[in-house]
């Protein structure tokens, strides 16, 4: 059986995870949140007091790590496990975002996690989101989408999310962090963030969550020739 793969790339705060998760549920695909995988490595570095920008130190701890993905039948969500501990919530702490971006810039980290991601695509219909899914991880994906929005719009979404989680946040600081994250992700030497030549651009700056979802669902159905009832696994 040949499985289908959809790659959704884009900058931080574009809504990739939220939309990919909902699209996967709608279409009967497995959702793979690659950002969560890198966040798990970032969390490991943070807990060990390692500078995430130090590629040598980060590479040294990789053989010591046990990182796995699991899917909870109760909530249908992807759970991340670090050395046997469910860290699904811990990796969403605000400070881990910066760690994730920095560790993801190291070739050793990307090589360490690549097979985990490709294995999921070989065994399931998948929607996978990240920074370089269509360009590096799944270059042969059936459909590639580059999801983006203006920095101000992405910062506002992130700011709202932090407040809803009960975390302290300042909008201007969040905006500065979004702009800096864009700079880091687009200028890194290994797998920089960029729109692939064969990717469909989806800009959701002026759209709410429902509008963004309908935009992507329409692109997928049109490009893959899928009927409205969805595509079964």
Image (spheres, rainbow, N blue to C red):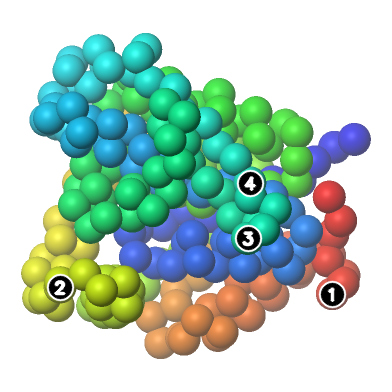
Q: Which residue is mark 3?
A: 75
Q: CA distance from mark 4 to mark 1?
A: 25 Å
Which residue is denoted by mark 1 in the rendering? 228
Closer to the observer: label 3 or label 2? 3
Residues under numbered marks 3 and 2 in contact, where contact means CB atoms less than 8 Å apart: no
Whole-angstrom CA distance, mark 3 to mark 1, is 24 Å
Which residue in the protein does label 2 denote?
Answer: 169
59 on left or right of 10? left
Q: Position of residue 214 (x, y in %)?
A: 63, 80
Question: Disc 2 versus disc 1: distance between alpha carbons?
Answer: 40 Å
Q: Nearer the viewer, mark 2 or mark 1?
A: 2
Q: CA distance from mark 2 to mark 4?
A: 30 Å
Disc 4: which residue: 71
Please indicate whether residue 154 sits to the left or right of residue 52 in the image: right
Camera-nearest label, 4 or 1: 4
Q: Position of residue 169 (x, y in %)?
A: 15, 73
On the question of residue 194 being in view, the answer is no
Q: Which is more N-terminal, label 2 or label 3?
A: 3
Between residues 195 and 100, which one lies in front from this camera angle? 100
């Amino acid at each position: 059986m040949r499985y289908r793969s959809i790659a959704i790339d884009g900058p931080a705060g574009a809504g990739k995870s939220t939309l990919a998760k909902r699209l996967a549920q709608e279409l009967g695909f497995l959702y793979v949140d690659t950002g969560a995988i890198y966040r798990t490595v970032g969390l490991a570095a943070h807990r060990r007091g390692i500078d995430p920008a130090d590629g040598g130190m980060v590479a040294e701890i990789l053989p010591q790590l046990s990182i796995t993905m699991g899917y909870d039948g109760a909530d249908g969500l992807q759970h991340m496990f670090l050395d046997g501990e469910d860290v699904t919530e811990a990796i969403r702490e605000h400070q881990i975002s910066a760690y994730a971006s920095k560790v993801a810039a190291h070739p050793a980290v990307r090589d360490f996690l690549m097979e985990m991601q490709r294995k999921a695509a070989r065994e399931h219909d998948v929607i996978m989101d990240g920074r370089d899914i269509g360009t590096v991880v799944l270059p042969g994906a059936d459909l590639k989408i580059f999801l983006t929005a203006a920095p101000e719009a992405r910062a506002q979404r992130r700011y709202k999310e932090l407040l809803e989680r009960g975390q302290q946040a300042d909008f201007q600081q969040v905006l500065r962090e979004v702009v800096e994250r864009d700079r880091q992700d687009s200028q890194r030497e290994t797998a920089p963030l960029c729109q692939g030549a064969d990717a469909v651009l989806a800009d959701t700056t002026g759209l709410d969550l429902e509008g963004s979802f309908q935009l992507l669902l329409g692109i997928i159905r049109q490009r893959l020739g899928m009927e409205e009832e969805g595509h079964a696994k």
